[in-house]
Image: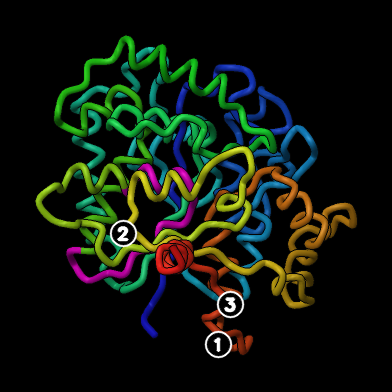
Amino acid sequence: MGKTLFLLVISGTDTIKHQGISAAGANHEMLPYTAALDAEFIYHGHTKTLDKLPMSPSGIVSPALISKACLNLLGIDILIVDSGAHIKPQCPYISIREQPSGDISTGQALTYDEVVELYQAGKIFTETIKDYNKLIIAECVVGGTTTALALLEALGYKCSRMLSSSFPEGNHNLKEKLVRQGLNLAKISDDPLTAVSAMGDPMQVFVAGLAQNCLENGIQVTLAGGTQMIAVTALINKLNTEHSATSGVKIITTPWIVNDKSARFADLHQLCCPSIEVQYPDTKTLRNNTLLNEQISLLSDNELTLNLILDRYEEGHVKEGVGLGSLLNLFQNCPERGMRASRTRSLLYINEQSEKRA
């Protein structure tokens, strides 16, 4: 079976100063707290910096709630890494970087030296997790789908309106405005790290270095997320043009990302990393008492029952974060629950079948 580690990488970008950039907080002033609160909840099962989990402006709870319920039921080891969160969590964590990255609209989110340092830190970090042969890498970066779009565009991918958002309807106009402003000011060469320096965030390049080195050292890697992990995968491939450095990696996300009507995830996948399998759970099987009871034990709020949360996610709110899709998928396929791996939906498999039918 092997030993699995859930690694949550939190980070920050000053791009969140723009109103309407993210729904990962009850209001704009709460956005800097989200990463710390999610990390605290994943580690402790409760928050410390403030008295409750992050909520969207519509009152939808952070995916950290269900992610933690899954982690408790699965008994997986947890490690928190901070690569530049605005506010530091009150739980044990490993610090890779203190400060958040800058606003991508300036065209210089990070210095080139900082990017190189983060990339090397990711590679070196493999030594810290050498006792594990399976790694689930999750993220919490408020504004991260905007920096994902910015990085992909800086790397040369034309992916306008393909990326999801924490808002049901997306916030494409604002994202694209900021990206255009940044690209007009940026100095980007053939070196992919200059794209990160201009338009990225610290999580992306740290995870790219970590995932690449883990794969080279025989550690199975799951990138737990949607559009942000597509951007990480694209970065790895751009940094390693002579061979497929992402061979063996999986991206696992939620069906709400894959089926997001305000985005074009399948097109994004085919454009940026078509050879990488993207999986997502069949959430219809997850409305069960085991997960419900664990969620209630963590947050006994009658207005935030599991079914209601899943309903709101299906409506397009929040959709993903803190490894939600990957952990739901793993819980669903846990042998102790008698679930079959065939419950997992594979986007790569669907695409292959579509090609055969064509």
The residue beneath circle 3 is 343
Q: Earlier in the sequence, mark 2 or mark 1?
A: 2
- Amino acid at pointer 2: Ser
- Amino acid at pointer 3: Arg
- Amino acid at pointer 1: Pro
The residue beneath circle 2 is 275
Q: Secondary structure at mark 2?
A: loop
Q: Is residue 78 visible?
A: no
Q: Earlier in the sequence, mark 2 or mark 3?
A: 2
Q: Nearer the viewer, mark 2 or mark 3?
A: 2
Residue at left offset 63%, top offset 86%: 337
Colour scheme: rainbow
Q: Secondary structure at mark 1?
A: helix
Q: Which residues are magenta?
A: 216-233
Q: CA distance from mark 2 to mark 3?
A: 21 Å
Q: Is residue 25 visible?
A: yes
Q: Which mark is residue 135?
A: none
The residue beneath circle 1 is 335
Q: Count residues near mark 1 (Cα–Cα under 10 Å), then give few for <14, some for 14-19, many for 20+.
A: few
Q: Nearer the viewer, mark 1 or mark 3?
A: 3
Viewer-nearest residue: 79 or 260: 260
